[in-house]
Image (cartoon, rainbow, N blue to C red):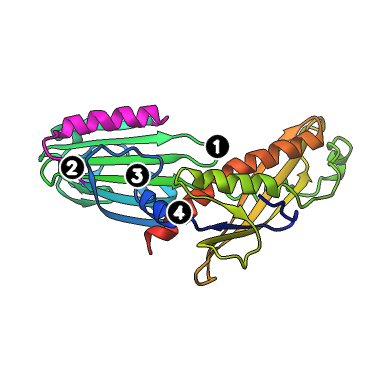
Amino acid sequence: MKLLTPASMALAFGPLFCAFFAAAQDHPLISVYPGSKLEDRKAVAFDEFKFPVDKMWAGKFTKELPLEGKITHLRYSNPPERSTLELLRNYETALKQAGFQTLFSCGKEDCGKGDGETQVGHYSPGYDTRFISAKLPRPEGDVYAAINISGYYHDTWITVVEVKPMDEAMSGRAAAPSPQSQASAPAAPPASSSRGGSGHVVTGVVKGLSQFGMQAKAGAASEKADIIVEGEVETSPFQGNDARVKWARTTATLTLRDGRTSKIFTQFNVTDKQGSGDYTEAVRRSQAEMGKKVAAQINSEIAAYFENQ
């Protein structure tokens, strides 16, 4: 892999386009019961969602969590000769192994009363319905998964909400201190910034796509590719509450283009901040964590793009 200039980068993804497209259909965080057939898939990059965590009554869920983020809806036809209970138990185990925490789980009449289309698919407790909602805590944003299994329709609806973290562009900024507080205010770190850390971003991009079997190479944006990733990485200090801790914030601004048309299909920022007694170490930690966040974000953005092609 060629070295990139500190201020920009271009990655080409082309050799295994078909393999990526096929692998991108299932959600990468949810294991699907073997033999299930994907019938429908819809996703939106950012929207609000009322996530059910309790039974239904009179056609409405009695408790819902207001969430915002990327929302993915999948509908699978259930494999033959498998009961809804067997499917539920397998999904419960798979979610637990993936680090999810169960928020609510029910079967048949215990799921409540009602029958109709909901935000998590057709929900009908009186007709052999099994349901589980779960949460996966993550530093880059929690993930919520709802699995609605219908014995009547022989379908399973999987809904995944990836909560996007709050934009921290304003973090570390404070109002000017009053004259009384200026004397005790902690000293600010050096007011300087650097454009570096692109190596960590490149690593993050490659890691984010490796599970799809895609290969990546660094080069000019004019090189033939299916996807071109361009971006800038900037690290700068900011003032914290403890003068003994030096803080560094790294922000990656990324643009993704369709290599076939050269059109931009998404742009986004990823930010991470880390502290240490030594500013150089804070920078290293911040840029390293940035690479991990980029891996997850690149994975999500490109999967969302190709699912609508």
Q: Are marks 2 and 3 in contact (CB under 8 Å)?
A: no
Whichever of labels 4 and 3 marks the residue nearer the N terminus, that label is 4
Magenta range is: 77-100
Whichever of labels 2 and 3 marks the residue nearer the N terminus, that label is 3
| Label 1 to label 3: alpha-carbon separation | 20 Å
Whichever of labels 2 and 1 marks the residue nearer the N terminus, that label is 2
Q: Position of residue 231 (x, y in %)?
A: 65, 58
Which residue is depicted at the point 75% across and 56% down?
5
Q: Position of residue 138 (x, y in %)?
A: 50, 36
Dot 4: element: loop
Which residue is depicted at the point 78% across and 41% down?
239
Q: Nearer the viewer, mark 4 or mark 3?
A: 4
Q: Residues within 10 Å of mark 3 (few under 14, many from 20)?
A: many
Query: Which circle marks residue 78 in the picture?
Result: 2
Q: Nearer the viewer, residue 298 or 234?
A: 298
Residue labelled with disc 3: 51
Q: Nearer the viewer, residue 81 or 111?
A: 81
| Label 4 to label 1: alpha-carbon separation | 31 Å
Residue labelled with disc 4: 16
Query: Which circle marks residue 139 in the picture?
Result: 1
